[in-house]
Amino acid sequence: MRRVQPPQLQSQNHKGTDVKSNLAEQKKLLELHTIDSGLARVAYREKNLPELAEHAAVTKKRTELSARLAADLGELEDAKTELGRLESDAGVVDARIARDTERVNTSSSMKDVAALEAELESLYRRKTNLEDMELVVMERVEVAEAQLSATRDLDNDLAEKLEEIAVRRRAALDELASERATLTAQRGLLEDSVTPDLLGLYESLRAKTGTGAALFRAGTCGACTMSLTGNELVKVRSAEIDEVLECPECGAIMVRTEESGLW
Ligand SMILES: [Zn+2]
């Protein structure tokens, strides 16, 4: 009497398995493998889209530029603060000039007038100095504004570039999602046409080895490309057509068809 092995032990037998399946059904495993390879390619392309690297590179540039933006903005604010301080100082001097001039015009004391005129002379010197300094700082403000504007232009260019990359990334992801949907639908139909035993074996081998089944051709496993020789090859040749064979090297189901060169 034949002992029924629990399912988890079946796949540990690297030569024959307990699952029987006709040629047509085993061929469906090859279609399933093609679809699964397609799904794996879709997943790989999703993770390795050139747009992802492009987006990351431009984002990095923009992050670096944000430090420059902050520095440019800081320089402009400093220059404007400095200009404001000079303008305020000039305002104080102007007020004192106006006050002293008024006193000169109204004072009757020659001594006071002389003192006020001396002070006025000093105030005018101070005013000239402040005006000279204002000119220098105004130029600094202009340079800082131009620099900030140039950096902002660069930042806007990078922001536009990011949007453009994001649009391309979205389109590429949509295309891959549609490819996945098509493959998944095809897989669903195929799954329905393979017996649960065979499908279960295929899935468990795929989970374990990465490839559930591959075409056996010219004495070679299509999954790991190992060529069978000697006893191993004799066993494959002599196995019944409905026997489901696993590769002794990688464990994938070796599907034998007319292309295998065995019969
Ligand atoms: Zn193999």
Image (cartoon, rainbow, N blue to C red):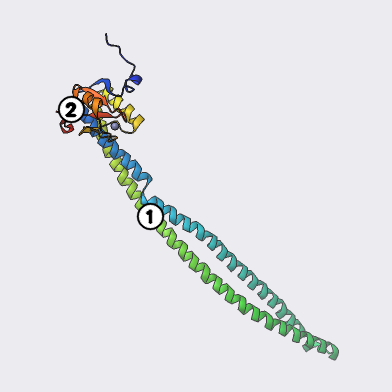
Residue position marked by numbered label 1 in the rendering: 165
What number is the disc on residue 15?
A: none
What's the amino acid at mark 1?
A: Ile
Is 244 located above or below residue 48 in the figure? above
> Considering the numbered disc 2 on the image, is that residue within a helix, a strand or a loop?
helix
Between 250 and 41, the one nearer to me in the picture? 250
In x, y percent, where is residue 178? 29, 42
On screen, residue 35 versus residue 9, left or right, reads left
The image quarter containing residue 14 is: top left
For the residue marked with disc 2, what is the amino acid?
A: Ala
Left or right: residue 212 compared with residue 124: left
Residue 135 is situated, as x and y percent measured from the top left of the image, at 61, 79
**Which of pointers 2 and 1 indicates the residue nearer the eye?**
2
Residue reaching furthest front?
A: 230
Q: Which residue is painted at 26% across and 20% down in the image?
A: 19
Percent across and percent down for residue 231 are 24, 25
Q: Residue at x 51, y 58 (%)?
A: 64
Choose the circle earlier in sequence order: 2 or 1. Answer: 2
**From the image, which quarter does the C terminus lie in?**
top left
Asked whether the residues under the numbered discs 2 and 1 touch, taking CB atoms below 8 Å apart as contact, a structural biologist would say no
| Residue 6, quarter of the rendered image | top left
Could you classify mark 2 by the number of other residues whose Cα lies within 10 Å: few (under 14), some (14-19), or many (20 or more)? few
* Residue carrying label 2: 24
Q: CA distance from mark 2 to mark 1?
A: 46 Å
Q: Is mark 1 within 8 Å of ligand 1?
A: no
Confirm whether residue 43 shows in the render.
yes
Image quadrant of ligand 1 equals top left
